[in-house]
Amino acid sequence: TLYGRTPEQIAGALASEPVEVIGLNCSTGPQVILEGLQQMREVTDKPLAAFANAGEPKMVEGRLLYLATPEYFAEYTKRLMQHGVRLIGGCCGTTPQHIRMMAAAIRALQPVSAPAQVLVSPRRKKKSAPARRMKLAPRGERSPLGRLLDEGAFPVSCELNPPRTPATGRILRQVRMLQAAGVNVVNLPDGPRASARMSPMALAHIIAGETGMDTILHYTCRDRNILGMQSDLLGAEALGLKNILAVTGDPPKLGDYPMATAVFDVDAIGLLRIADNLNHGLDLAGNPIPRATTFFLGAGFNPGAIDLALEVDRLHQKIEAGAEYILTQPMFDQEKLLVAIEKAGGVKVPIIAGILPLGSYRNALFFHNEVPGMSVPEPIQERMRLASEKGKEHAQAEGVAIAREALGAVREYVQGAYIMPPFGKVEMAIETAAVLPGRKDLAQVLLEVEENGGEE
């Protein structure tokens, strides 16, 4: 399926549910439908249903046509019945003639009971056995970030938006400043707020080659179908990129190109299943690949979500789908973050807390009033208002102070920090992280840059 589930997994999950019939419909022709039902029969004795398309559609003289003939459908109707399928019909491309031929085939045969034995060839059965999944190496062997989390080192990440031009000089200078400050990894969003920017995958590769800095590559479901996703993920593995953050993505209507097409074949949960399967040596169709990928997979969590119960449920689904660490949205009310973590209950993967140093009073008002799920408490708004009246530098210093307080409040409950400086101001990220052991403040970083002749 689009979510990376095999027919056996789906039928097995439904076998104990109060459903009368399990089956497959649409998307493909009768041959593939039959193969899928054969796999389902391995794990369930419930009645099976089949509603196939009339083959794959073809464009003929400007018209989309389905070319599987009624006679072909009648032949597969017999095969379906012989495998115990009890509910048979047609989906896309089938015509009244298809149905008449299928009905004639059904009348010619008595329905057989669902066979007790497996009616799958040994070759097919061996291919679909659970043992085919390759063993995943420990996270510390797959990723520097994974190793830091294993060691309890409290890694710090900083978010940097990819540039809107092909030029990388500025962002590479920022990365080197963050390295000097003791920041461990850089987060690279994928078209944040539906904007058109440099590919974060290309940028991550450039950063790794130029600086050696570890990166977390955000990957959205908005811009690619599932074939493109698998191609990109295989390419990321070939480039040596290890940390992937699966995100559903903002719809285009929020960005600069509202008429752009949104794909969304899957959401973040489905993307995690696809990537997790690749990590275990399986492609989209469940076929083995000679070499598995070695991604360290992450997912997002919004502790300020309006429907927190739904957000918690999706968090657990993401972990079940393969997420190995969680990055949270920034919170200015740390109590809400702790409550959300408590409600999530027993999360067994590391949580990296989002920290956002406010740049101004206007910045605080924007997040409080215009960003769903984000709340800036009144006392913090007032602090930013008073600081902003004294000037930009005072406002930014107050924003850093508030961010440091937030970091201190959640430090013992999370396993890392994910700092999102406003407007790409890495100086604010450096000052925020400086409160943690082993990190340098901005003055130390600038001195180091000067001693290195400005190369940083």
Image: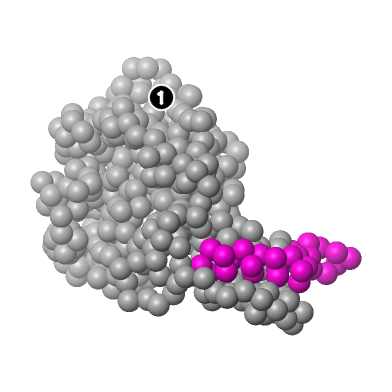
Q: Nearer the viewer, residue 28 or 59?
A: 28
Q: How many residues crowd mark 1 within 10 Å: few (<14), some (14–19), many (20+)?
A: some
Query: What is the quadrant of residue 339 in the picture?
Result: bottom left
- For the record, the magenta segment spans 57-85
Residue 395 in magenta stretch = no
- Whether residue 105 is situated above or below residue 364 in the rendered picture: below
Hey, what amino acid is under mark 1? Gly
Residue 5 locus on image (x, y percent): 44, 55
Image point 51% across, 67% down: which residue? Answer: 84
Q: Quadrant of the C terminus?
A: top left
Residue 196 locus on image (x, y percent): 57, 52
Q: Is 262 left or right of 440, judged from the image as shown? A: right
Image point 31% across, 27% down: which residue? Answer: 141
Q: How is the image coloured?
A: one colour
Residue 14 locus on image (x, y percent): 36, 67
Query: What is the quadrant of residue 11 in the picture?
Result: bottom left
Q: Is 132 left or right of 238, judged from the image as shown? A: left
Callout 1: helix, strand or loop? Answer: loop
Residue 366: tell me if it is visible. no
Image point 34% across, 34% down: which residue? Answer: 135
Count of marks, rendered view: 1
- Whether residue 277 is situated above or below residue 305 in the rendered picture: above
Residue 405 locus on image (x, y percent): 15, 51
- Whether residue 300 is situated above or below residue 380 in the rendered picture: above
Find disc 1 in the rendering and name its residue.
212
Residue 65 in magenta stretch = yes
Q: Nearer the viewer, residue 402 or 437?
A: 437
Q: Nearer the viewer, residue 419 or 454?
A: 419
